Image (spheres, helix red, strand yellow):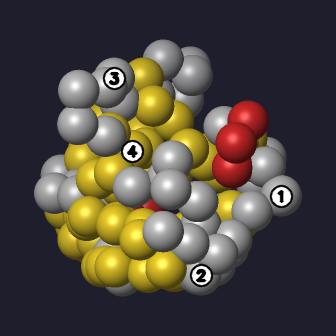
């Protein structure tokens, strides 16, 4: 089991910055991919940024060049540095981690409780 706790959300003016953190506890040795998703009211949840176990990064199109995903060396904390926040960015941002069997099949997945990001214009 992996337990995730996010922090760092809040209210920021358009053009401002926030850094989200997600700290994992429990079976952290099994963690592979670590990602951030967001969901705005009335919209589908979407992937914002992913960092794979092989350190490949993937970003949602609007996040490219503005957001940076990173994690500490022991994979206990994943960060999302968000720069130049726009009025389209407000949502609940949630941390997600996945673990895999040695074969590559998904073993389990875990979600954090979410943290609200609000951007004022």
Say if 116 sits above or below 83 in the image: above
Distance in Å between CA atoms under marks 1 and 2:
14 Å
Give the residue at mark 3. Answer: 44
Residue pictured at 34% horizontal, 66% vertical: 118
**SS label for mark 2:** loop
Give the residue at mark 4. Answer: 38
Along the polypeptide, which appears first: circle 1 or circle 3?
A: 3
Distance in Å between CA atoms under marks 1 and 4:
17 Å
Residue pictured at 28% horizontal, 53% vertical: 92
Residue pictured at 23% horizontal, 37% vertical: 41
Query: Would residue 86 be seen by someone viewing this image from the given angle?
Result: yes
Along the polypeptide, which appears first: circle 3 or circle 2?
A: 2
Q: How many discs mark residues in the rendered view?
A: 4
Horizontal placement of 113 versus 49: left or right? left
Along the polypeptide, which appears first: circle 1 or circle 4?
A: 4
Residue 71 in the image: state x and y as whole percent: 60, 72
Circle number at residue 45: none
Horizontal placement of 44 versus 80: left or right? left
Query: Would residue 22 be seen by someone viewing this image from the given angle?
Result: no
Give the number of the mark in front: 1 or 2.
Answer: 2
Closer to the camera in the image, 106 or 66: 66
Give the number of the mark in front: 3 or 2.
Answer: 2
Residue 94 in the image: state x and y as whole percent: 32, 53
**SS label for mark 1:** loop
Give the residue at mark 2. Answer: 16
Circle number at residue 65: 1
**SS label for mark 4:** strand
Local packing at callout 2 (Cα closer than 10 Å; few below 14, some 14-19, many 20+) is some
Local packing at callout 4 (Cα closer than 10 Å; few below 14, some 14-19, many 20+) is many
């Amino acid at each position: 089991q992996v337990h995730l706790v996010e922090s760092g959300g809040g209210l920021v003016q358009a053009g401002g910055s926030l850094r989200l953190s997600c700290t994992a506890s429990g079976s952290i040795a099994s963690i592979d991919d670590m990602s951030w998703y967001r969901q705005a009211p009335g919209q589908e949840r979407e992937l914002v940024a992913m960092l794979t176990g092989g350190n490949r990064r993937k970003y949602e199109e609007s996040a490219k060049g503005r957001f940076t995903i990173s994690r500490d060396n022991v994979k206990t904390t994943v960060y999302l540095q968000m720069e130049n926040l726009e009025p389209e960015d407000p949502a609940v941002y949630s941390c997600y981690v996945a673990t895999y069997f040695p074969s590559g099949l998904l073993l389990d997945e875990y979600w954090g409780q979410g943290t609200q990001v609000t951007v004022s214009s």
